[in-house]
Image (tube, rainbow, N blue to C red):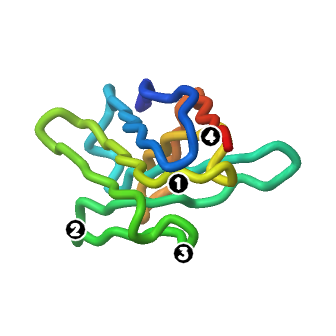
Amino acid sequence: QVQLVESGGGLVQAGGSLRLSCAASGSIFSINRMGWYRQAPGKQRELVARTSSSDNSTVYADSVKGRFTISRDNAKNTVSLQMNSLKPEDTAVYYCRAYSSYSTSNYWGQGTQVTVSS
């Protein structure tokens, strides 16, 4: 089992910045990918960004490229999402996800609210 604890959400004005962090504990060896997803009211959960420790790759949603940066600290088992130039359409609950691309291991955090006011 892997436990994920998220922090850093909140309310910010358009154009502002927030940083989300996710700390993983437990059977970290069973996962190789960590990332952030978001779900806005009435919409499906979508990928924001993810990173892979097996090939050091990162993937971003087109809507956040150039504004968001994902980073992972393997020594601390954390993944962070630096969000700059925030827009009202970035408002959503953001979820940390840890999973394996080689097995069915898949874990989600409890979610943190990000609200961007116009």
- Relative image position of residue 93 (x, y in whole percent): 65, 37
Tags 3 and 2 touching, CB below 8 Å:
no
Tags 1 and 3 touching, CB below 8 Å:
no
Spatial separation of the CA atoms under disc 3 and disc 4: 19 Å
- Relative image position of residue 72 (x, y in whole percent): 24, 48
Q: Where is the C terminus found, in terms of image quarters? A: top right
Q: Please name which of the two marks, 2 or 1, marks the residue nearer to the observer.
A: 2
Among numbered discs 2 and 1, the one appearing first in the sequence: 2
Spatial separation of the CA atoms under disc 2 and disc 1: 20 Å
Spatial separation of the CA atoms under disc 4 and disc 2: 30 Å
Q: Nearer the viewer, residue 31 or 92?
A: 92
Spatial separation of the CA atoms under disc 4 and disc 1: 34 Å
- Disc 4 is placed on an element classified as strand
Could you say which quadrant of the image residue 27 lies in?
A: top left
Residue at x-position 22% and y-position 68%: 56
Residue at x-position 18% and y-position 43%: 73
Instruction: Name which residue type carries label 2.
Output: Asn
Among numbered discs 4 and 2, the one appearing first in the sequence: 2
- Relative image position of residue 26 (x, y in whole percent): 32, 27
Q: Nearer the viewer, residue 1 or 117?
A: 117
Among numbered discs 1 and 3, the one appearing first in the sequence: 3
Q: Is residue 78 above or below residue 87?
A: above
Q: Please name which of the two marks, 3 or 4, marks the residue nearer to the observer.
A: 4
Among numbered discs 3 and 2, the one appearing first in the sequence: 2
Q: Give the crowd class for mark 2: few <14, some 14-19, many >=20 residues within 10 Å.
A: few
* Residue 104's disc number: 1
Q: Please name which of the two marks, 4 or 1, marks the residue nearer to the observer.
A: 4
* Residue 116's disc number: 4
* Residue 62's disc number: 3
